[in-house]
Image: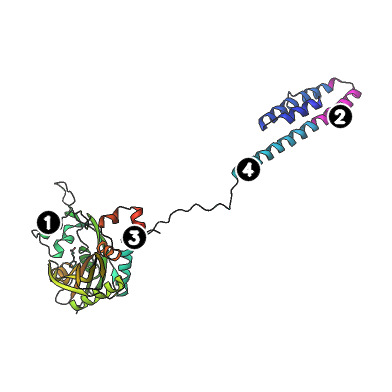
Amino acid sequence: LRQQWLDRIKSAGDSASIEEVRLAALGKKGEISLKMRELGRMSPEERQTTGRALNELRDEIDAALRARRASLDDAALEARLAGEWLDVTLPGRTRPAGTIHPVSQVTEEVTAIFADMGFAVAEGPQVETDWYNFDALNIAPEHPARQEHDTFFMHRAPDDDRPPHVLRTHTSPVQIRAMQEQGAPIRVICPGRVYRMDMDQTHTPMFHQIEGLAIGRDISMAQLKWVLEEFFSAYFGTRVKTRFRASHFPFTEPSAEVDIQCSWNGGALKVGEGDDWLEVLGSGMVHPNVLRAGGIDPNEWQGFAFGMGIDRIAMLKYGIPDLRAFFESDLRWLKHYGFVP
Ligand code: PHE
């Protein structure tokens, strides 16, 4: 009997069959338990010897069951460890690190240069009322600039009486907001997204501008020229001359378009040398009507303003021929220009 049970225990291969064997031997209706119950019908002598033998057998079976269970658990653990082992000497799996978008990198760079000259950053909404985008900037409702700007107008239901909104076509409305919020004097730059219906090699419907505004009692065009030359020299890392050409913007008087000195050497553009010129921004002295719209008295204050395309000066610095590539997120392109390691 003993050997029979021990063999059954040995051949139990998992915890369920061990439990089966345990019930068959020691359970309420197990063979050993039933035999023990029979002790009552035996004579005292018989009971003593059989009883002791049954007790020993029960203990032995119990111990054998425990031992079998323990060894199965060990084996299971072994198997798990063997399956889950980790070779810590394997080389790591590298994940490519993300980087800041080139336009954001250039925006930060430009902002830092102007910050060194005492300009704070101001921001405004990209969905702007047409008052801020046009009227406050001295662009009358019938002014052709509204059409020239290829404006995206927000759709309005006929009974909607909120003021008309547009996607801002330039960062100049932030001039007005800055004036209203801060009053004079002011020295701010306003970087941000702007929108125009235009798409070719050098235009995307969304692009980036940075606006500059300085208002004080004796701000002059000479200071504008100094600030811009300092900026371009710092940005391109070489002394850069600027050329002012008379121009027209409704929000500045006088107005100037600004070119930077460059050379086209066998198709390769070099900024800061040679005797070619490249147009990079619009600027001028803030128009009295614009100061008034911003709540500033033009008899007491005057200022300069400029607006420049961030993507454009990024293209110039990195020799990028196509603006659209900036917004395509093509990894090969980003790597080629060193924007991604
Ligand atoms: N807002 C003008 C543009 O988008 C640029 C500009 C800004 C010109 C400030 C003069 C003064 O073309």
Q: Nearer the viewer, mark 2 or mark 3?
A: 3
Amino acid found under the numbered disc labelled 3: Tyr
Q: Earlier in the sequence, mark 4 or mark 2?
A: 2
Under circle 4, the secondary element is helix
Under circle 3, the secondary element is loop
Q: Which residue carries the number 3 mark?
A: 337
Q: Nearer the viewer, mark 1 or mark 3?
A: 3
**For this view, does 116 lie left or right of residue 67?**
left
Disc 1 CB within 8 Å of nearest ligand 1 atom? no
Amino acid found under the numbered disc labelled 1: Gln
Q: Which residues are magenta?
A: 40-58
Q: Nearer the viewer, mark 3 or mark 4?
A: 3
Q: Which residue carries the number 4 mark?
A: 82
Q: Nearer the viewer, mark 2 or mark 1?
A: 1
Q: Which residue carries the number 2 mark?
A: 52
Cα distance between the residues tagged 4 and 2: 45 Å
Q: Which residue carries the number 1 mark?
A: 147
Q: Earlier in the sequence, mark 2 or mark 1?
A: 2
CB contact under 8 Å: marks 4 and 2: no
Percent x, y for residue 66? 74, 36
**For this view, does 311 lie left or right of residue 4?**
left
- The colour style of the image is rainbow
